[in-house]
Image (cartoon, grey):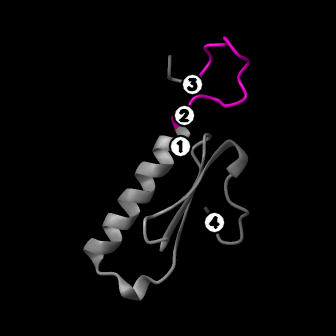
Amino acid sequence: MTAGSQGPNVEAGADVYSPDRTVRIIASVEGQVDVRVQGLRRHTEDSLALQVRAAARLALAHLQQPIRDARPGDDRSRPGWG
């Protein structure tokens, strides 16, 4: 993402935080990702990597969920699934 951009469309994607809420990942199903970090000084390289991995796992799990507004009995899911 470029500076000053509005970020991905969260409605169709994921907006998740790491367990300690220092890392926020906003991802769209179109592949746009925005990563925001707060409290960087309190992390070592290893602890920050753990928080980023945890947030990335949450974002991926959220993006891989079936489409919520599909009609009952409709087997559609996200592209590449099914």
Looking at the picture, tell me which residue is in the foreground, 44 or 66.
Answer: 66
Q: Amino acid at mark 4?
A: Thr
Q: Which residue is mark 4?
A: 2
Residue 23, horizontal then vertical, whole percent: 48, 69
Label pair 1/2, CB-CB below 8 angstroms: yes
Q: Residue at x 50, y 22 (%)?
A: 81
What is the crowding at mark 3: few (fewer than 14 residues within 10 Å), some, or many (at least 20)? few
Q: Residue at x 64, y 29 (%)?
A: 67
Question: Is residue 26 shown in magenta?
Answer: no
CA–CA distance in space, label 3 to label 1? 14 Å
Q: Which residue is mark 2?
A: 65
Checking the image for residue 76, the label placed there is: none
Task: Locate residue 47 relative to residue 73 in the image: left or right.
Answer: left
Q: Which residue is mark 1?
A: 62
Q: Which residues are magenta?
A: 64-78
Q: Amino acid at mark 3?
A: Pro
CA–CA distance in space, label 4 to label 1? 24 Å
CA–CA distance in space, label 4 to label 3? 27 Å
What is the crowding at mark 2: few (fewer than 14 residues within 10 Å), some, or many (at least 20)? few
Q: Which residue is mark 3?
A: 79
